[in-house]
Amino acid sequence: MADVDIPEVTDFLAEHAPFAAVPREELDRLGRRLTVRYARRGTHLMSVGKGNDEVFVVRSGAVQITDENGSLVERGGEGTGFGTTALGGSPSRFDVVAIEDCLLFVMSSEVFRELADHHPAVRDFFSEQREARLRHALVSLPQQDRHSAVLQTRLRDLLRRDPITTTGGATIREAAELMAREQVSSLLVVEGDRLTGIVTDRDLRTRVLAAGLETTQPVSAIMTPDPVTASPDALAMELILEMTSRNIHHMPVVEGRRPLGMLTSTDLMRLERANPIHLVGDVAKAKDLAALVLLSQRLPRIVDQLVHEDATADGIGRIVTAVGDAIEKRLITLAEQGLGPPPVPYAWIVLGSQARLEQGPGSDQDNALVLSDEVAPEQLEWFESLASFVVEGLVACGYPRCPGGIMASNPEWRQPLRDWKRMFARWINEPTPEAVLRSAIFFDLRLVHGERSLVNALHAHVAALAPRSGRFLAHLARNAAHNEPPLGFFRGFVLERKGEHKDRLDLKRGGVHAIVEIARVQSLSKGLPQVNTLSRISAAANAGALAPETAADLHDAFEFIRYVRLLHQARQLREGQDCDSFVSPDELSSFEKRHLRDAFHIVRSAQQTVVQSYPLGFVT
């Protein structure tokens, strides 16, 4: 560095993050490899869309950084660094302008790469900037490829009239007359200004007419007390999720306990995105497998609509899962109608993405049966018939068989509770790489139908054993760290090199699945009950297994990668193709490419945290 005092450079760098973490002698060497550049006020140092191969540090003066939309990202003075996101010629996502005369220290990409390789603190410092930008991207994402904000409508803005109410002491006849007069399908039952119950036209049919109940009885005799309610500040998307998962068609909107009005599935039809509610209801009434097959064919259109509106990836996953749950439950009910009542209590459980409420289009089926310990050998045939009917029915409805055979039709996954407990104890207490890899999916399980106590007992068993087995957790951690994000250092994405997905980007293995595995190991390490990945991340942070900043970053990365994958899958659905997670870079917008890189960097950083948390060196 000509005409510059090296000790002065070293002193300056040592006073500013992240260089303060670098030893003095290395800062001296770094100083000799820097150049100095002067920029007059108004000079554009970086421009959106243009490549860059240098990293800058402001020695004096000030710069302003704005994004591609012109929004202010940062104003920085002495010590401000920029340029790392566009290294290697990648198009810059930011404009950087000198707002004062500036003196800049400049290092080449080669120098910065060596520094970041040898000093994680430097790498992590600039990664944090990347993570903050990803969060900014998620905020602006709805404006990129989505056409309206109907699902972001507040419920208070959907209310069209004041609530129609009655009291618990009114007669059933009076309530029915009021409903007819007001032309509504439900009434809110109040005591003063407090909601106490709800009565629907279905209640009048099933609890009065069908039961032969006198209409002089009080309406409190047939109402649903303390109904599920929604906040007026909740979003339409949240209401759809709640009504779909519960298969209900009326939702009181309350402030505190004071009713503001009623929203129904008919009201939501105005949004043109409420089809899942009706689909779940229709599935529950399907009379046979043929009817279920026809109904299941409506799901791809719903997914396509939701993806291209303003639904989140998490919301879409929950809706797709709710439909899958409804189909599975109806198949079980149809099977029981044909087979007769079960000989002993049982629990039908789902595993993997469906258990995590993260099912997507084209997901295969993963299920199992937990039987009461009272089951006798001669009763096993009933459960074999049940499993065969449901598994075959799911195939007919578009849910392929699990390639690994993890289905209730496989006798290995149709066991009494005591045998399930033994299997989990063996996986946890005597782990081997192959066994843990094969069994990991079973640590994501959820009841769909049957005896909840059987599943609760299994969850409690796992929660008691897992935190105490360091070897088991180390194996899980190794699996989580093994799925490397498809990202090269300053080189863009790493694409598949051969096979049918050659030259495509795998969003699942080192993206979605890597985050799922990170969340799983950190959650199990604390014996937490959550199964959904985002819930696991939050719970792990609350329990101290993840730093709050890491949890927030993983949350954003998981949402963004899944959203990009859903866009890809929606395109495949429209073109009649099978859905997968392999995306051609040509499909991706520059916005998606830039922020996918940020998301993958977050995954890589979280994996390094996992590696440091567990003694992977002792796992063989």
Image: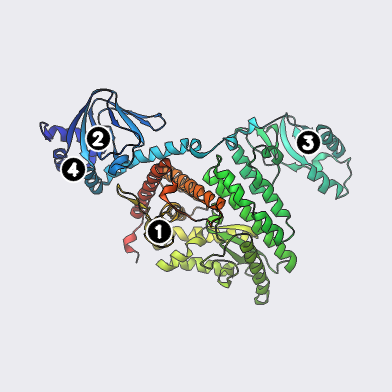
Residue 158 vs residue 144: left or right? right
SS category of the residue bearing label 1: loop
Quarter of the picture holding the N terminus: top left
Mark drawn on residue 502? 1
Three-letter amino acid code of the residue under disc 1? Lys
| Residue 510 position (above or below residue 395) | above
Q: Residues within 10 Å of mark 2 (few under 14, many from 20)?
A: many
- The image's mark for residue 23 is 4
Marks 4,1: beta carbons within 8 A? no
Q: Which mark, by number, is residue 591?
A: none
Provide residue 44's location: percent of width, then percent of height. 29, 28
User: Could you say whether the residue bearing mark 3 is in a helix, strand or loop?
Assistant: loop
Q: Residue at x 67, y 39 (%)?
A: 268
- The correct choice, above or below, for 549 with respect to 40 in the image is below
Residue denoted by label 3? 184
Tell me how far mark 3 sits from mark 1, CA to CA.
58 Å
Q: On the image, which quarter does residue 456 sit in?
A: bottom right
Which mark is on residue 56? 2
C-alpha gap between disc 2 and disc 4 = 20 Å
The reply to whether the C-beta atoms of the residues labelled 2 and 4 are less than 8 Å apart is no
Residue 169, image x and y in percent? 82, 35
Q: Which residue is at the front of the view, 421 or 102?
A: 102
Counting from the top left corner in percent of width and height, residue 498 is at 38, 61
